[in-house]
């Protein structure tokens, strides 16, 4: 760090402290008159343009993302601060480093401020936090000594606008024929999982699918941290609660799934299945709540059964019990991947039990460079969608597709 930059950081830190003191004396917005008043107390007078610039910087540090604010832009989904102070950004071009670098005090101060803004404690006693900011940004932070060098920050930014299936198609996430199949999936009230690795767009696609549900349906969304922004007229969100500093008051996803059953849901949605709550979800979907869905991390569609078995074990379900529950509660896997920075549909598979009674996922449709290709379960998927279309109205934009067709 150069001497001039160090002096600049010190000057900014001093000004931030003065503005915080001014806010305590006179609560209100961080605006130009306030900054000008604080500067005058320092014996400094700036021109209009400089005062506006300083106000924007102070506002970013107090209310925004501070030194990371300049990295927020169209297409940016993640901002990552490593323990060495390097900052990476994930956007349509993929994950890449930036020129921004945070000192250990800067990274720690930012992590603590953002966690506090999200209602989470972050200090030496509780050196990690998962928070959701009022702006919709999801924050995960880890402090030393858990991170050897400095604070580690992972920020998941919400999309500037809620994307529908058509918009996702324009971005290259899925083709027209795949869109038709997915619309039929929702219209036929088939229970499904959206799967994929980190950053493949699972929540984005799930939200796009849920907005296609009939407006007369009541959707109850259960999440650990609010992330699903569903553009639908009747959505209820439930969010888990962490324990307070005394270790009391925690409300986990398992409890919330149970509570959702008493809320007259037409569709129960579990934002992310990653623990014992999978047992409650399966029981809920086995009691007449059709059309339920959620997301699960998995490398491939074929890996989903093993992933569900691992989650089921946390809920006390052995392989056989898990397979029996899933066979009647979840039917379809919609798997996403990411290639060269593009998040896209890769496969649609059916969940079923094999001859030994164990859970398996068999490909129904696979996406390749020529479009959709039939898999071994294509006919079974088409029959299931056709059967569902007779008992539930499909969206007006589609009809039950013939899953055996090959895209042109």
Image (tube, helix red, strand yellow):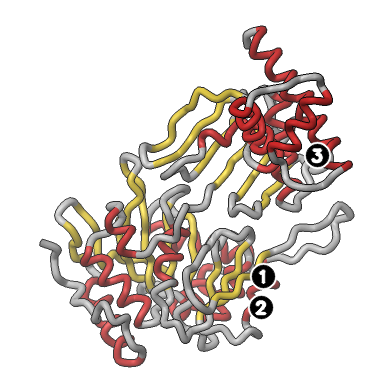
Residue 150 or residue 22, whichever sits in front:
22
Element on which disc 2 rests: helix
Tell me which corner region of the image, top left, top right, bottom left or bottom right, holds residue 10: top right
* Mark nearer the N terminus (3 vs 2): 3
Q: Is residue 321 above or below residue 310?
A: below
Element on which disc 3 rests: loop
Residue assigned mark 1 = 254
Residue at point 85%, 44% (across, down): 26
Residue assigned mark 2 = 258
Q: Is residue 317 something one can see in this rendering?
A: no
Residue at point 51%, 39% (across, down): 72
Check whether the beta carbons of the residues at disc 1 and disc 2 lie within 8 A of each other: yes
Residue 150 or residue 403, whichever sits in front:
150
Residue 112 or residue 201, whichever sits in front:
112
Tell me which corner region of the image, top left, top right, bottom left or bottom right, holds residue 18: top right
Q: Residues within 10 Å of mark 2 (few under 14, many from 20)?
A: some
Q: Is residue 159 above or below residue 94?
A: below
Check whether the beta carbons of the residues at disc 1 and disc 3 lie within 8 A of each other: no
* Mark nearer the N terminus (1 vs 3): 3
Figure quadrant of the C terminus = bottom left
Image spot of residue 343 (x, y percent): 35, 50
Element on which disc 1 rests: helix
Q: Is residue 240 above or below residue 5?
A: below
Q: Nearer the viewer, mark 1 or mark 3?
A: 3
Residue at point 50%, 23% (across, down): 99
Residue assigned mark 3 = 123
């Amino acid at each position: 760090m150069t001497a001039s930059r160090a002096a600049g950081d010190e000057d900014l830190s001093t000004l931030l402290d003065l503005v915080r003191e001014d806010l305590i004396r006179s609560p209100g917005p961080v605006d130009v008159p306030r900054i000008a008043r604080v500067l005058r107390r320092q014996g400094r007078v700036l021109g209009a343009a400089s005062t506006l610039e300083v106000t924007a910087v102070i506002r970013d540090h107090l209310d925004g993302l501070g030194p990371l604010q300049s990295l927020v832009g169209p297409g940016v989904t993640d901002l990552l601060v490593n323990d060495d102070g390097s900052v990476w950004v994930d956007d349509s071009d993929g994950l890449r480093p930036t020129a921004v670098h945070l000192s250990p005090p800067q990274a720690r101060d930012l992590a603590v401020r953002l966690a506090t803004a999200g209602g989470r404690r972050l200090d030496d006693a509780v050196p990690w936090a998962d928070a959701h900011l009022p702006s919709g940004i999801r924050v995960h932070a880890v402090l030393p000594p858990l991170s050897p060098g400095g604070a580690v920050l992972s920020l998941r930014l919400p999309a500037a606008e809620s994307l529908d299936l058509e918009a996702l198609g324009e971005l290259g996430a899925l083709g027209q024929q795949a869109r038709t199949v997915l619309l039929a999936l929702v219209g036929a009230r088939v229970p499904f999982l959206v799967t994929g690795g980190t950053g493949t767009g699972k929540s984005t696609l799930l939200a796009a699918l849920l907005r296609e549900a009939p407006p007369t349906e009541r959707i109850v969304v259960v999440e650990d941290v609010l992330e699903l922004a569903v553009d639908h007229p009747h959505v209820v969100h439930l969010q888990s609660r962490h324990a307070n500093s005394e270790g009391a008051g925690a409300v986990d996803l398992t409890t919330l799934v149970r509570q959702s059953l008493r809320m007259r849901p037409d569709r129960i949605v579990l934002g992310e299945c990653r623990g014992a709550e999978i047992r409650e979800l399966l029981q809920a979907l086995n009691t007449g709540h059709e059309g339920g869905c959620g997301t699960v991390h998995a490398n491939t569609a074929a890996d989903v059964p093993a992933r569900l078995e691992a989650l089921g074990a946390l809920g006390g379900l052995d392989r056989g019990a898990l397979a029996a529950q899933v066979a009647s509660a979840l039917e379809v896997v919609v798997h996403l991947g990411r290639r060269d920075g593009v998040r896209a549909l890769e496969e649609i598979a059916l969940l079923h039990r094999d001859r030994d009674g164990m859970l398996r996922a068999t490909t129904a449709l696979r996406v390749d460079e020529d479009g959709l290709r039939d898999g071994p379960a294509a006919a079974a998927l088409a029959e299931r969608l056709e059967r569902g279309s007779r008992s539930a109205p499909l969206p007006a934009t589609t009809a039950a597709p013939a899953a055996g067709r090959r895209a042109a």
